[in-house]
Image: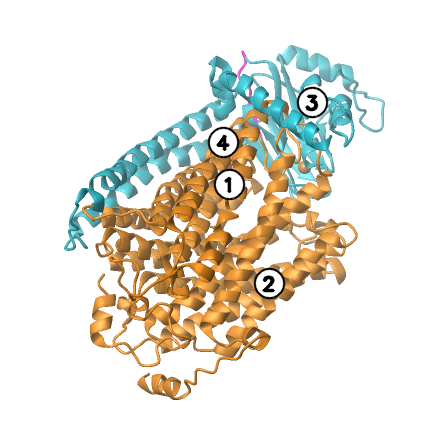
Amino acid sequence: MAELHQTAAHAEHDHKPHGWRRWVFATNHKDIGTMYLIAAATMFLIGGLAAMAIRAQLFKSGMKLFDPTMFNSLTTMHGLIMIFGAIMPAWVGLANWMIPLQIGAPDMALPRLNNLSFWILPFAFTLMLASFFVPGGAVAGGWTMYPPLMQQFGAAFPMLIFAIHLMGISSILGAINVIVTIMNLRAPGMTLLRMPLFVWTWLITAYLLIAVMPVLAGAVTMQLTDHFFGTSFFNAAGGGDPVLFLHVFWFFGHPEVYILILPAFGIISEIIPTFSRKPLFGYEAMVYATASIAFLSFIVWGHHMFTVGMPVAAQLFFMLSTMLIAVPTGVKVFNWVATMWRGSLSFEPPMLFAVAFLFLFSIGGFSGLMLALVPSDYQYHGTYFVVAHFHYVLVPGAVFAIFGGVYYWLPKWSGRMYDMRLAKWHFWLSVIFVNVLFFPQHFLGLAGMPRRIPDYAPQFTDWNMVSSIGGFIFGASQVLFPYIVIKCIRSGKPIEANSPWDGAHGLEWELPCPAPYHSWQTPPTEAMLAHGAEH
Amino acid sequence: MKRARLGRLLGSSVLGLAGRLPLAWGASGWDELNMPRGVTSASKSIYALHMMALWVCVGIAVVVFGVMIWSLIFHRKSRGAVPDVTLTHSTKVEVVWTTVPVLILVGMAIPAARLLVKINNNTDPQVNIRVTGFQWGWRYQYLGTTVSVISKISASSNAASQLHSGIRPTSVPHYLLSVDHQVVVPVGEKVRLLITSIDVIHSWWVPDLGVKRDAIPGYINEASFTIAADRPGTYRGQCTELCGRGHAYMPIVVRAVTPAAYQAWLKKHSSPRARRPRTPRQRP
Ligand SMILES: [Cu+2]
């Protein structure tokens, strides 16, 4: 390991390539991380525009802005864009930026692989978005792509499947890189149980990715051969089984949910101790809780399909295994609360987002627990209650954690401080209107409004209007985010110290701001490690 | 001009919203916020389970959020709070917050499991109906009779739902929730549905009956319900599995009548001589 660091030190010439070559041939973890984050922000914007269109159509009963098929395309593509285009690349971008900094490595272990895994994405995204413009329009069968409905779409269908293949390859390569980096490039003395939790949660996420992305690829490939090569994997008329797809898809789909949220747990575990000025409570319990959540995520997929008519024993099993996830998740929440307890709290933007995460992710967890109870799920399934549930987990959950992470580390990346006042505006607008947007959807679902419908009975109008108004303001306030970031990079106040946060611990804060182009050219000293690993 | 229209639309919407909101909170308004109790023992038990789970969650939230809010108020740096950096681990507390949730979960799982087994009992039905979903409607065949009902969205809802219809949804009775031919069932008798599909996956859901079951090609799913004898009436629901462009336009309307009226209806619509079951005419 020391050898590696020396090689890196020797190889250090500060001649980073300039112009477009720096980006196209990028091998530097920071450059690649930046590109990932820009790509994620772009897709977040596009997926957000689709969401605005959806909320406009649902503004009132009888509103007919879009043809029903176009509406279905919008919901389908909104889901796929946000999951595969926005949240996942944002996590990979943050991993690229932070993992080498946090474990005392000079760069990611496999820089060229890193370049490939990023540059696959623009092609995948283009293929996916271009499917809007082919005859018949984009796939309109929901992001879950259930057959036989999925088989009814035209040229967009193979385009989407190839896009998923590409994004899957990209994710697997990214995950391999993360695992190899964490396993091999940790600085001397950075033992596994000294690693920051963001690194830990990403390590576990990377294993999840490698385990389930091939499953998704297999499932969609079987749909492809059903469509073009006359196989009958999911075609009942040919002796196949549509429910098989549901099983395979959700075997991917549930771990996928944790791929989207585990890195968020990591970030929250970094931010809360910093702004509580107190070490994280129960560090080891956090690691074990993350690992048990990851393990359990493989045996709960059936809870997405309680209404397909599984045997009662299977429904019972999936109900109990799902409820069990509440235990490690609870441990995590309690640990965060205990970290704040008797701390010395201050509320800079990262902490504001982290605190909102704690409250609102918990609400998503509560509705998740309710959804786990099979008899109740018979009523909730396929309604806006489910939509409310997973948006609470993903928007004030995953997305708020991404915002928190960016506001936490942006000074380290840019060497400048952003406009705190504007960032607080961004926070308050987001946190208020995310609730106006999603909370009423619980009511709509309970009152009987199915999800994925372009029009609804008049009695659902009131809460849909509230939700849409919340959505428009929430959407509009997100424009602040790129503005704040760009303004910070261009004209933010330069930071002299290594850390703008007085309570921050971790190797990344032992480096100057901005972090040098090649992160750790000499391994951190034991004193730095000891200071960093104060958990 | 466009802007003026948009302005008017927004204005009328906001006013409409303000006017209707008190209703939403009013006497009948709870229905708009919560799951219906329904008219079968299953739907009532599900409602009870749902409320139990909801209050358990509220209870946990009060405790956890209470502690958090306490910290947010009293352990602020600006109030001069000094961090207790030694507070990083406590086996006692950690054992408590692992075991207490387990006990709560067990307490929720037991009634849920009991109810699950109970409502999945499809034995000894008195009426058997095969339900077939298609793009976009439902076909109901009364097994052991020649009666068959093909049920699609009502003409008035269909007309209003067209792209440039200009018909206000509120002017249509039960917009998107009315059909041309209702499925008729007796109250007080156990009705078993055998649910399938001829094309894509659909899902048959009537909230008041507490029944939601997917209609899947190649599968015959079972579900059953018994409507309380004192609750004849019309119960409405929708397809709950995305099934293409007509997904929002394949409602389900169940008319529950007394057993005598049911028998009379059945007799009236069965056609012993017809080779194929005939679709009865009904009022929408
Ligand atoms: Cu349907």
Residue A228 % position (x, y): 76, 61
Mark linked to residue A167: none
Q: Is mark 1 within 8 Å of ligand 1?
A: no
Indicate the chain on which mark 4 is placed: A
Point out the frontmost of discs 3 and 2.
3
Q: Quadrant of ligand 1?
A: top right
Please give the residue where the numbered disc 3 appears in the rendered image: B169
Please give the residue where the numbered disc 4 appears in the rendered image: A440
Is A370 covered by the magenta stretch?
A: no
Residue A432 % position (x, y): 43, 37
Identify the amino acid type marked 3.
Pro
Identify the amino acid type marked 4.
Pro
Position of A21 relative to B63 (above/below): below
Secondary structure at badge 2 equals helix
> Where are the magenta residues, as a range?
B224-230
- Quadrant of residue A402 within the rendered picture: bottom left
Earlier in the chain: of badge 2 and badge 4, it is 2
Indicate the chain on which mark 1 is placed: A
The colour of chain B is cyan
Q: Among the chains, which one is orange?
A: A
Point out the frontmost of discs 1 and 3.
1
User: Is residue A130 visible from the viewing direction of this image?
Assistant: yes
Indicate the chain on which mark 2 is placed: A
- Mark 1 to mark 3 CA distance (whole Å): 28 Å
Q: B93 or B64: nearer the eye? A: B64
Question: Is A109 left or right of B208, judged from the image as shown?
Answer: left
Identify the amino acid type marked 1.
Phe
Is B225 covered by the magenta stretch?
A: yes
Indicate the chain on which mark 3 is placed: B
